[in-house]
Image (cartoon, rainbow, N blue to C red):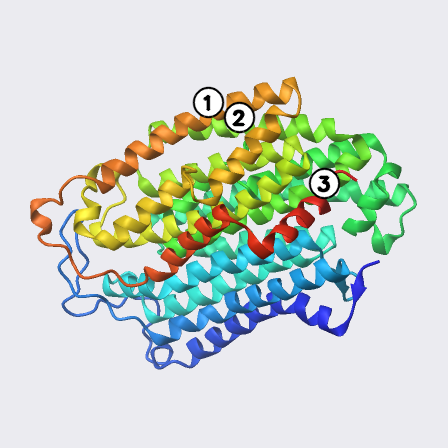
Amino acid sequence: MPYQSGGAALLLAAPVAAPLVIATAYALTGTRAPYAQEGEHEQPVVIADLPVRPAGEPESRPVPRQHPADWAALASPVAILLCGSLLAAGVLGQGPRTAFSGLLRADALTAWMLLVVGAVALIACGASPAYLAGERAAGRASERTVWRYHVLVQSFLAAMCLAVVTANLGVLWVAIEATTIVTAFLVGHRRTRTSVEAAWKYVVICSAGIALAFLGTVLLYYAARQAGIAEAWALDWPTLAAHADRLDPSVTRLGITLVILGFGAKAGLIPLHAWLPDAHSQAPAPVSALMSGVLLSVAFAAILRYRAIADAALGADFTRVLLAGIALLTLALAAGLLLGQRDYKRMLAYSSMEHMSLIALGAAIGSPLALSAVLLHIAGHGLAKSAAFCASGRILHLTGTSRIGRVNGLLARAPSVGGVFGCAVVALLAFPPFSLFASELGIARAGFAAGTALAWVTAAALLLVLAAFAALAARTARMLLGPASTAAGSPGPAEPGIWPLALGLIACAALGVGLGPLTDLLHAAAQAIGDR
């Protein structure tokens, strides 16, 4: 029986409410700022002696000044982490916790995902002041666009947290759709032709996916009502999972297929994946970190919820075949595109597709070991990819280009940025001691132990992973190694905003060495979405 209390209601509502409060504060402060009364409107501020630098020109300007107000955004990730930690302790001690007549619910998976969202948001929001300072200095951001950025990022965090803590599949759909609306404006934040085009592609493709997910949700609601489940509980996830054997198999099969395809679009899986490289390459670097680090994982967490219903209603073979096929196709496409990639931000985006396909493969295997590895992979990928994307933003400010062929000698030119970017890519390549080594090893072990068919699928996946490994390693080495160009001169001052990225990589390595107090939570989260 889920545990209900006033404390549970506060802990479940706070991860959604805290970012909304911060967003409101930014919005009110922005409307009352002097620039809003002076008719500055949307024109970018070009600071004297800090002109826009052409691509390839060496870094010679002073470190841009960071605004203290930008650091207020860290309050919401701290609140999310605190609530996630308290909910984890409560769930492990007393079982699932509910509030607001069951609308919000926390089990071990909820607590795990809140910790991942909070950790990645802490990295992204901690790196934002330095990134925004660089944007101001380059004349690409005005004070108004900065305030808008903060409001949208905080709203984005609130929507993701709502998707994590709700037990109602209808509210889950609304929350995922809200992330699409909010992040569309963030993708087009710079208002260049390329960024606006990427935003429109993102909206169109993800809206098609969300429409499929909506239709699948409606079909599951219909199946639940036909099975005699009360209207108020027909979209309640625990109720559907407990009574899945009463659902009509044909309707459930169609509904689950549409849901996996629809939410798979948000997770960057085939066939509705085309938005991901454009959106991630054009969004501000901290936003790309949030989108790749947790938005994809939040969408896949929704698929894991539906998978538990499908396995109870239809048996494990249906979702196993569907997810394994999607995983292999996505991995093959990502590996092929990585081999020919010439843009480092798009390279990181295709790497996200690779890792999401591995997560889908682990979900297809479905054993306790595989699901534990999937959740560990979600956390490790979020930490490493957020550090990589935020470092790519610093590289873009430093070099003025996102072309891999125009960037070389980063370790000699900017040791702190180059070192963090290199370590993040090493983590994404699943080298020990980073946690992706343990999670990918766990998925591989589970796949080879799951039977002949899945063993062959796992072997094919590993071959594709090796191709992606070679492409990512070769292009990153091209950027990091070698002497700095003669025009670059001596290495510049230490880059600001590096400490959150370093902390993220340290956390990723710590998860690879040992989970410590998170061990019980990880196993409980895997059990929550495992065989019933």
Horizontal and vertical percent position of residue 520: 65, 52
> What residue is shown at x 51% (from left), y 30% (from top)?
330
Horizontal and vertical percent position of residue 446: 61, 30
What's under tag 3, amino acid-wise?
Answer: Gly
Horizontal side of 53 relative to 187 (left or right) equals: left
Please rate how many residues cluster around mark 3, counting C-alpha atoms within 10 Å: few if below 14, some from 14 to 19, many from 20. Answer: many
Secondary structure beneath label 1: helix
Q: Nearer the viewer, residue 526 or 304?
A: 526
What's under tag 2, amino acid-wise?
Answer: Leu
Horizontal and vertical percent position of residue 262: 62, 39
Q: Nearer the viewer, residue 17 or 151?
A: 17
Earlier in the chain: of badge 3 and badge 2, it is 2
> What residue is shown at x 23% (from left), y 36% (from top)?
478
Q: CA distance from mark 3 to mark 2?
A: 24 Å
Secondary structure beneath label 2: helix
Earlier in the chain: of badge 2 and badge 1, it is 2
> What residue is shown at x 80% (from left), y 44% (from top)?
241
Residue ID for mark 2 = 329
Secondary structure beneath label 3: loop
Can the viewer see residue 272 in this picture? no
Asked if the residues shown at circle 3 and circle 1 are in contact, with their CB atoms under 8 angstroms apart, the answer is no
The quadrant in which the C terminus is found is top right
Q: CA distance from mark 2 to mark 1?
A: 13 Å
Please rate how many residues cluster around mark 2, counting C-alpha atoms within 10 Å: few if below 14, some from 14 to 19, many from 20. Answer: some
Residue ID for mark 1 = 463
Residue ID for mark 3 = 530
**Is 214 situated above or below 459?**
below
Pair 3/2: label in front: 3
